[in-house]
Structure formats: C-alpha cells, structure tokens
Image (tube, rainbow, N blue to C red):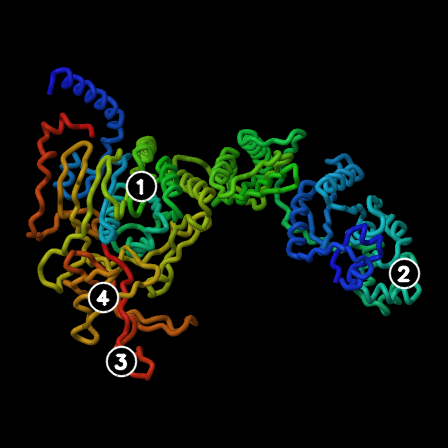
Amino acid sequence: MIHALDEAAERLGLYIGQPLANARAMCPDLRVFDADPVADAKTLSDIADWCDRFTPLVALDPPHGLFLDITGCAHLFGGEAALLQTLVRALARQGFAVSAAIAGTSVCARTLTRQATGTIVADGGEAEAISPFPVSALGAGEAITTGLRRAGLKTIGDVASREPHEITARFGARFSTLLAHALGQGDAPINPRKPLPDYIVEKRFAEPIATDTMIAMTLSRLADTLIASMEKQGKGARRLEAAFFRTDGVVRAITVETGRPVTRSAVIDRLFRERLDALADPLDPGFGFDMVRLSASRTEIVVQEQRDLDAHVHDNDELAALIDRIAARIGGKRVVVHLPQDTHIPERAVWSAPAQHHLTAAMQAEWPVRTESEPPLRPLRLFDKPEPIKVPFATVPDGPPHQFTWRRALHAVVRVEGPERIAMEWWRQDGKQLTRDYFRIEDAEGLRFWIFRDGLYEGEVFDGDGKPASPGWYVHGLFA
Amino acid sequence: MSGARGSALAILRGQIERIETAEIVHQRDRVALGHSEADSALKGGLARAAIHEVFCEGRQGAAATGFVTGLAGRVSARRPLLWVRQDFSEIETGALSMSGLAELGLDPRRVVMVRAADVESALRTSADALACDALGAVVLELWGEIRQFDLVASRKLTLAAQGSGVTGLLLRMAAQPLPSTAETRWMLRAAHSPPGSVWSAWGAPVFDAELLRNRHGPCGRWIMEWNCDECQFSEPSTYPQPVAAAPAHRQDPAVLQQRRAG
C-alpha cells in the first residue's frame, strides 16, 4: 500500500492508500521505498526542534504537521508575512516541501495549508477564507468526507451554511466542533512539546559562530541578560537549558540543574563550561551556529538572606555550588547524600538520594544513635549483593562456621560474636525472604567480616523433595 | 663524595628548603590523632591542607577504609566530607556504609558521596573539591594501580589543598606505593583484636599502620586503635604482640634535618 508519494507520482494519478500492485500496473518503473514511520516521526520532531527558533510553543500534528503559536513573536521577524517566508524558504533549502499558512485558529491554519499554502488570514476572516475549499481539506476522516459529499455539501462554505444542529445530528459533535474551530469560532488548544520556559534570552548571528571561545562568550552574555531579567522579579534558576541552532537545521540542547536557585551569571557560566567540557559527544558546530538560546525552564523565588557573619550558611552555599558543578560534569545522580530509612534490613537502611535535591534534608536527618562503649555493630563496607561463601561445616547446626572460603581464599575463624537475627519484612511483596542470622567474625589475619546464614536450620530451607536442606552462607560486609 | 658535588647538593637542598617553606604556613595547622607515638613522629599530628596517602593490599580494603575514615573524622572538624570513589572499588570491597560510619562515631550527615565512573572524572572531581574551602576533607578512593595518577596529578591535588586549606586523603587499595607529593604515606593492615577473653567486647577497629613516608619527620609502625566513643586513635591498652621497629634509615633527627627532600 502506498504510504506517501511525491509530486510526479501524484501527477500520474497514484494516490495514498492505493495497493502497490495497482500502482505498479499503472507505472511499471515505479521506485518504491519501505515506509519508516519511526524515522518520519524523528524527522518531524527534528523540524520541530528547528522551529523552536521562531517560537517556544511548537506542537506536533502527526503524521506530518506542526503547529507554531506565533502570538507575539511575528514582529521579531519583520511581521507575519516575513516570518512565513523565512520559515518556508529555510525549510525548502533543507530539502523539505512545505505548505504553511497563518490563521487565527490552528484548525483553520491547517485547513489552509492543504489548499492554499502561503495564505495569511487576519482574525475574523477565517470563514470567508476557507469556504471555497472542498470538505476534504478539513481532514475529518474518510467516512465523514464521503458522507458530506453524498449529502451534496461539496465545499466548506456549503457545510457552514447549514444549521449547526443538523451537522451535529448527522456527523457527530466532534465534527461540528472541528468545523466551528476551522471557521474561527473558538479554538482547540495546541499541545506544545515543551513547557514554556519562565525566561528566555537568545542571540542570533548574521555570521554563524563556530569557535569555542565565541560560544562561551555568547553564553556568558546571555547569562548576564537572563540573570538581569530574573533579578527584577526576585527569581533564581533551578534548571537552565542552552539550545544551539546549527545553520543546517540541527538543534542541540544542553541542560544543567542546580540544587538551589542560581542568581549569579558567573555560576551559570561555570556550570555550562563544566557541562560542555564533559560531554561524551562534544558540541559539533558543523558550519556554525546561527542562534543560541538560553532559557530558565524552572525558577524559584529567591529569599534574600541577610548575609551576616554566619559562616555556616556561607559554607552550605559553597558546598551546594560545588555539588552543582560536579553534578553538571558527571551527572546529578552520581552525587549523593544519605538519608536513614526506617527498616532493619541492612541493605535498605540507607537511601542514597541526589545531593542537589536532598542536601538540606540530609544535613538535618536523624540517625540512630550508636551504643556507647560497644564495638561497631554494622560493617563499614557493605556489599550491594551479599557474596556467597563456602562453609565446610559448623559444629553446632545453628552456630557460626569454623572456617570459610570467600573469593577462593580460606579464612580461619578466630573470634565470633552473634548471632544477630534479622527477620525479613513479610509485608513486602518481593518474593519469599529468609530469616538471616548475622555473625561478626575475625579471622586469623585480623580481617573482620559480617557473615550471615540465609534461612533457619530445619525451618525455612528445603531441597527438592521437601526435606530440610542446609542454608547458604554469605559475606555481607567488612568491618574496619 | 667530591667537594664540588657536595656543594651542588647543598645548593639544591637549600633551594628545596626555600620551596618547602612556602608550604609551612599551612603546615602549622596539625590535628593530633590521639596516638602519642604517631603524633610525635608527625610533629604534633596530621597536617591539614596537604595530601595523605593510605595504601593497602586488596583484601585489607576495609581496614584501610576505617583508618582513612578515622583520619577524615579527625581533620574535618565538623565540616562536610566529600568522598569520591570510582565504581570499580565498590564491586571489589563493597560500598561505604553510612551505618558503619555512624558506628565508628562519625556523622553521616556530613558525608557527600561522589560516584565517579572512572579514574579521570574521580581525579578531576577531587581536584575541584579540594579547592572548595567549605569542605573539611576530601577522600579519593581508588582501586588498583592507576596510570593516570602520576606526579603531575598528585602535585595538582597538593596545590589545590594548600590553596584552600582542605585536607586530601587518598585511599589506594590494591596499589603499590609510588613517589608522589603527599605529605605522609601509610601502609595499612588489619591488626588482631587484643587477646583476652573471647567474650569481652572485641571488635573495636585496630590497625597495623606503617608510616612509610613522612615529609617532615621520621617514619614508624604502630598498632593504633580507633576509639569510637571519643573519635580518636589510641594505643591499645593491652597489646603484647611485638611491633616492628621504626626503619633504621629515618630515625635520627640530625639525619632528618639534612634529608628533608625526596
């Protein structure tokens, strides 16, 4: 079946949805390519990225449409006509066949692109502009379009001349809403791909820039402007995005996040420098960038603190700034602080949370108090997954081993303390967990281990025949 | 030794002396570890604003971690501690457990952990962090022999530490000690718990710490016990095991005055 075709094929009378065999019969030397909807969607989204240069509100209209909300943006490009011309020409230069139109409502604009590309309809002129077009331009679906034609309603004007309730009764409420929107009565909201950033600054270049120094300079100037506009409203940025628009249409966006609102442009500058330095696939300027945009997509109100002699507050700020820099370089999930959890299971006792978001909580966390004059009861190093050890025998069934093999080395047990029995939390739904008996052990060399027997003797572990089996032993941690 | 060579050596020593005096400003700031012999060898304690290296064999990783944790607890003085580690060391010796850290008497609230994927980013992160004077100490935990950690990298860390006054602690597991710009270099092994009744409270961390290099004093080897309640090192109360004597080549203070460099 034909999924898409070019102009030449269209002239031959082929149409979308036609079986391939029929098309081949009409035109034996037809060149056929497999449809790739995923690549099509990707291309559309790339074009949408590129269109971000005109307005931050770009919505996808699959399979091959884009809505741009240019409210308040047109004057930046010399008016609506100039904007439309710039957009169409630039996309044509990239090898796309474009039909574009501007209208007061998205549905109306879409209808126009199907019949009269390049049209600009002023507010209120929608009905008049689209009434001569055939009903198929509304894109209401095969059944409705055929139905309208059978009813003798050939143009949109014909349909509009009918009473709305008649249309609704015959073709459904959805169609009548679509029609109303096309005629400029109300509008369907478009669904922009990205939320509108709180603050945007951008710089365009007549001559594309490509060098690192120029890029860095541009970013720091943009940061100055951004900070200035945020400062007026007492805001600081928590997430910043820099978008680099390449002349050939490729757009690269780089995001940095911060733990607390940023109010200094030098900080933004440094974060981006760290991020750009650490990129696995560096920013490729190609033939240069013709536009750079810096936007603050998440902002917070900054509480202006009285900076007195409280060095502690200052230290915390410095630490947060350091964490932001490291996170910008190696990723926010790799810098963590620790929060105690209310559980006895050793591997779940601590939650490693991203430091950028949980620094304050971690600084104020309540940790269990250790017992005075007791040796450490929890190991300093804990294995993520307990490692199995070989225990030849234990004198008492419930007792600790006399020796064990871990990582191919035999350890003779000299001192033992235990058992400390830790029962699993039965209310958790992650499989049957066995009761563990933990022992603190010192070997002949002075190395200390935290080992456990997984399961009770003759109580929890069974072999295939249902007879009691000997439970497994594991090393869970190492004491200092 | 000929006279000309001797005087050339004397001139070089003088130059090194002058270079090193620049460091002395910070070096006065020392933290006593609590173990009297070690403190006297260290001229009062572990120097802040410098790099200290702790080496150990692979299987002694936990003991060395305990020692480094103790040092960090001593020098950081209630300021935040940044612990940088590479992914691989966590697989080998397990992750640093905050419950265990709390059991040693340290405060897990002040620990920020950086999970660096590789050595390069770990080194870079620690150099950055050492320049941030809000921190008390930076621990860099590395596993195995590391080509990237050469004299240049080591010097970079030292300069950053001197500039900010932050102490850098390098935990080098499964690595051989090599020349570097570190202020002190230790070799760590776990020591037995003091002998005695099996049921008496055993298990306080005991270290067999060998000071391999000390830029401003003699070396030595001691059994050091970490006191979890008082957060300091101490001599084990009863420890009849013989301890190796301090190496002969670094014990005379007069000789030391001449051999400051190297």
Is the residue under label 3 in contact with that under label 2 (CB below 8 Å)?
Answer: no
Both marks 1 and 3 on one chain: no
**Chain that bears disc 3:** A
User: Marks 2/4: CA distance?
Assistant: 84 Å
Is residue B98 shown to the viewer in this render? no
Frontmost of labels 1 and 3 is 3
Mark 4 lies on a secondary structure that is: strand
Mark 1 lies on a secondary structure that is: strand
**Where is A441 relative to A304, above or below?**
below
- The residue at which mark 2 appears reads as A159
- The residue at which mark 4 appears reads as A439
Looking at the picture, which amino acid does disc 3 mark? Glu
Frontmost of labels 1 and 4 is 4
**Where is A468 relative to B219, above or below?**
below
Looking at the picture, which amino acid does disc 2 mark? Val
Q: Quadrant of the N terminus of chain B?
A: top left
Q: Position of residue A394 (x, y in %)?
A: 18, 72
How packed mark 2 is, by other alpha carbons closer than 10 Å (few <14, some 14-19, many 20 or more), is many
- The residue at which mark 3 appears reads as A458
**Chain that bears disc 1:** B
How packed mark 3 is, by other alpha carbons closer than 10 Å (few <14, some 14-19, many 20 or more), is some
Both marks 2 and 3 on one chain: yes
Q: Position of residue A220 (x, y in %)?
A: 55, 32
Dot 3 or dot 4: first in sequence order is: 4
Q: Which is more toward the observer, A196 or B211?
A: B211
Q: Quadrant of the C terminus of chain B?
A: top left
Is the residue under label 2 in contact with that under label 1 (CB below 8 Å)?
Answer: no
User: Marks 1/2: CA distance?
Assistant: 77 Å
Dot 2 or dot 3: first in sequence order is: 2
- The residue at which mark 1 appears reads as B137
Please identify the quarter of the rendering in which residue B201 is found: bottom left
